Image: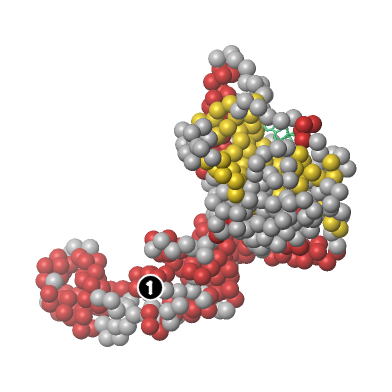
Amino acid sequence: MKARIGLEIHVQLSEAGTKLFCNCDSEYRRYRPNENVCPVCLGLPGALPVPGKRPVELALAAALALNCEPPRALVFTRKHYFYPDLPKNYQITQFEKVGGSPVCTGGYLDYLSPDDWEWRRVRIRRINLEEDPGRTSYEGSILSSRYAYVDYNRSGVPLLEIVTEPDLKSPRDARVMVEYLLLTLEYLGATNPRLEGVFRVDANVSLEGGERVEIKNIGSTLDVERALRYEINRQRLVLERGGKVERETRHWDAERGVTKPLRYKEEEEEYLYFPDPDLPPVLITRDLLEAAREKVAEWSPRRVYEEILGLGVKREVAWSITSVPAAARTYLAGVKSGGDPGILARIVGVDLKGELREQGRDPYNPGNWPEPGKLAELSRLVAKGEYTYDAVKGLVLPKLAANPEAPLEELLPEKVEDLEPLVEEVLKEEEKAVKDYLGGKKKALNYLVGAVMRKARKRALDPRRARELLLKRLEAMKTGA
Ligand code: ADP
Ligand code: MG
Ligand code: ZN
């Protein structure tokens, strides 16, 4: 049975700096409750909304990145409903009817599936720019709590609503697409996808011969996949038993891993939409559009990924770099300042990234990466054969991960210039291995190389040279005997 999946994705423009219509902070998580507020986002009488420049620029950049025809103007609409976390009793959003219009319609996104390295396309139906409401919370459950607490810190934070066509074919596809979309927005400097609650997904899914079901309130990309898996199985069982899948809205319960029916949903008519009389249309000027176009052209995951591939890097490593913008910026800047593209890719995309993870240091934080020039220098030392990659990986990268500011001179291990004394010592101490080798057991050579490496301790040594030297001496022993 084939599935069709369409998503509605809400993403906060957490990096905009300001809320959508006032100068409060778009990143509200660092405040105590009701500290990040003003008369506008509290909906006090007489306060007037003024569209922020950064939120508008970022929404426009997002529209272009999703290949939408840019709008001539942004038109805002009021959507009315009553809830304690919505102090004005209406949300300012965009709506194509009643004389309004969305940011844009009719785009698409090509996203990379790292499962099979194929590019797939999902059509974008529309994008809206709107305000996030505040938050209501309870002590424990809503039923047992003595109070409902409202916090308006989030009220008015710019939120993009991105609606796809039902082009996605599997739960995995849906997850991969959302991850790629978030990465695209992160590259634009629009959002930080790792902040708590920064995006929410509603997923619509239907099976051949059944109605579509909407699953509300999915909070992570992993849960996009889990919720859709569960829901597809549920619908399949209903159909196989000869039942009918009803058109309904269900709620994703992440803890139990199930979808459950929701009892009530407003119809669009009940929202009493009308254009906001406080907000004249925001004209999209040519300058605004040009700036957005340039940014989109330079910082898209696809552009970066293909540039890295073009440097001869394997796709797994190229994607590992691309999927962490701070790593990608470090890598590309490192190549520009003369780093060896292949060695630098291994450092940034594999071993230093792994080392950061292992030490619990966030690789998405640009401050945790060393200066690109320093890594470029390191890659050149390896390329010139001054140090082996293994020595850099084992002795330098762990220290660089712990302290990206540390100067290279202090980190580079002392080199063993004169290998011969070490080789002689090993030949003397490892009588058995030497005898084995001379008796025809070629594998004993590996053991001897290892013994030389251990003698070098924390100093850098080239295992190829150690092997050559050992071989020369052992062959001499053979012929000499
Ligand atoms: P509404 O206006 O009720 O929200 P829309 O027609 O705008 O409904 O669609 C909402 C979402 O449902 C979109 O993401 C769309 O891709 C998806 N969708 C529409 N039809 C189907 C379907 N048959 N199966 C799965 N998803 C669908
Ligand atoms: Mg909808
Ligand atoms: Zn405010």
Quadrant position of residue 64: bottom right
Q: Residue at x 77, y 51 (%)?
A: 45
Seen in the image, is 87 located left or right of residue 201?
right
Specify whether residue 97 is in view: yes
Q: Is residue 183 at all visible to an observer of this figure?
A: no
| Residue 170 % position (x, y) | 59, 36
- Res. 329 image quadrant: bottom right
Amino acid type, mark 1:
Lys
Indicate whether 271 appears above or below 180. above
What x and y, as percent, mark residue 258?
51, 31
Q: Is residue 36 above or below residue 389?
A: above
- The picture places residue 24, in percent across and down from the top left corner, at 67, 60
Between residue 125 and residue 347, name the one nearer to us: 125
Q: Extreme bottom residue here?
A: 418
* Mark 1 residue crowding within 10 angstroms, few (<14) / some (14–19) / many (20+): some
Foreground of the two, 429 or 351: 351
Q: Which residue is mark 1?
A: 399
What residue lies at 30% left-to-right and 86% top-to-bottom?
A: 417
Secondary structure, mark 1, is helix
Q: Quadrant of the C terminus?
A: bottom left
